Image (cartoon, rainbow, N blue to C red):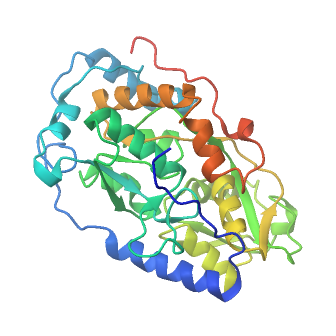
């Protein structure tokens, strides 16, 4: 675990205090998102030029076909490798202060990617996703601090990768078939599922008939929204549910809930648990009604970087001293009950990759 990192003490946020702080964080996230120019030609963050053929052309073709015929999105990734390639070479070629891995993250998801207001001064980003980003930077550039974090809203995760604003996104991002059309994913590093978050006083009991006629908040571009929209279309969602309230950042839904503007929030259970820890007036309602996996997202042609990240994930998972389990205990054990439920299964990779 990184030296000097502070243990947080934010349990028990609630009421007006949590609402005010959440609002500030949401505004900061929007202001800090850089409006950088598009580096044409498919280059990664900080530079131009597309990735040349790196000897994995067959695997790349298989990856594209798999995305089109997607049934198990968490398995549509390339086998791990420590070999360098054009994307990694481009990152390493950056000079001076720009020689960093550029990672899109959240800065207001409690215990995932956030700034601790109790640490004083310019609080560093910390959390489970931040640990992973440091680990990847150490492998690629030899320095865990050689990373530039860019705060990006939920609905900007894919565009930020495509436009070259970031090299990758490590931001509680669910691997799904639709996103595989636009970006490449690593193997899964966390298992979760969609859940309902509502006030403790609410009569809502979960993803069931008690949602009838209720207004639900989701983040634009989120798996929660697409799942609810599909369930509504297919008649699996309770009658009269209002899905019109969408926000750029998922935390904004908690603010809407605190203000009484919506009746419930639907989001990943891992994030919902962190929000319930921030505000003791809300709670998870019912069990998760989907099974989903978080992955690291990168450009579709960044095969060498995808392979390298998959190797890092294997090492992180196997590291008993400073790996996945350690980060879970550091950040998530107080808000989630059992790490075995969150550890993804042994990764499976594309054949011939």
Residue 346: x %, y % from top left:
60, 23
- Furthest-top residue in view? 352
Residue 233 makes an appearance in the image: yes
Image quarter of residue 144 = top left
Image quarter of residue 84 = top left
Q: In which quadrant of the rendered image does the C terminus lie?
A: top left
Residue plotted at (49% across, 49% down)? 129
The foreground one among 41 and 121 is: 121
Residue 201: x %, y % from top left:
87, 78
Residue 119: x %, y % from top left:
50, 71
Reply above or below: 81 against 1. Answer: above
Residue 208 appears left or right of 165 = right
Residue plotted at (55% across, 56% down)? 112
Reply above or below: 237 against 138. Answer: below
- Furthest-front residue in view? 4
Residue plotted at (36% across, 26% down)? 307
Reply above or below: 52 against 264. Answer: above
Residue 181 makes an appearance in the image: no
Residue 245: x %, y % from top left:
59, 75
Reply above or below: 312 against 54. Answer: below
Residue plotted at (11% across, 50% down)? 96
Image quarter of residue 137 = top left
Residue 143 appears left or right of 229 = left
The foreground one among 288 and 330 is: 330
Residue 319 appears left or right of 311 = right
Label tally? 0
Residue 275 appears left or right of 175 = right
The foreground one among 202 and 122 is: 122
């Amino acid at each position: 675990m990184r030296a000097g990192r502070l243990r947080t003490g934010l349990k028990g946020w609630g009421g007006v205090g949590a609402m005010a702080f959440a609002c500030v964080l949401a505004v900061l996230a929007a202001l800090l998102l850089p409006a950088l120019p598009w580096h044409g030609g498919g280059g990664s963050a900080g530079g131009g030029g597309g990735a040349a053929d790196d000897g994995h052309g067959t695997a790349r073709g298989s990856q594209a076909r798999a995305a089109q015929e997607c049934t198990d999105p968490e398995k549509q990734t390339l086998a791990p490798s420590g070999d360098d390639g054009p994307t990694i070479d481009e990152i390493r070629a950056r000079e001076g202060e720009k020689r960093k891995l550029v990672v899109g993250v959240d800065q207001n998801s409690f215990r995932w990617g956030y700034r601790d207001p109790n640490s004083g001064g310019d609080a560093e980003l910390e959390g489970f996703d931040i640990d992973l980003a440091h680990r990847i930077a150490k492998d690629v550039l030899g320095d865990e601090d050689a990373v530039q974090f860019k705060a990006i809203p939920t609905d900007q995760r894919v565009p930020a990768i495509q436009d070259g604003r970031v090299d990758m996104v490590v931001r509680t991002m669910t691997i799904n078939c639709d996103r595989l059309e636009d970006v490449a994913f690593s193997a899964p590093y966390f298992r979760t599922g969609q859940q309902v978050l509502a006030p403790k006083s609410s009569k809502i009991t979960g993803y069931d008939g008690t949602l009838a006629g209720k207004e639900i908040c989701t983040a634009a571009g989120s798996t929660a929204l697409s799942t609810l929209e599909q369930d509504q279309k297919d008649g699996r969602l309770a009658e009269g549910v209002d899905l019109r309230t969408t926000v750029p950042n998922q935390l904004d839904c908690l603010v809407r809930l605190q203000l009484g503007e919506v009746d419930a929030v639907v989001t990943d259970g891992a994030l919902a648990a962190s929000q319930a820890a921030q505000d003791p007036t809300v709670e998870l309602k019912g069990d998760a009604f989907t099974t989903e996996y978080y992955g690291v997202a990168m450009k579709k042609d960044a095969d060498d970087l995808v392979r390298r990240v998959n190797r890092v994930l294997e090492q992180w998972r196997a590291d008993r001293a400073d790996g996945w389990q350690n980060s879970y205990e550091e950040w998530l054990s107080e808000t989630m009950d059992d790490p075995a439920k969150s550890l993804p299964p042994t990764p499976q990779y594309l054949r011939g990759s």
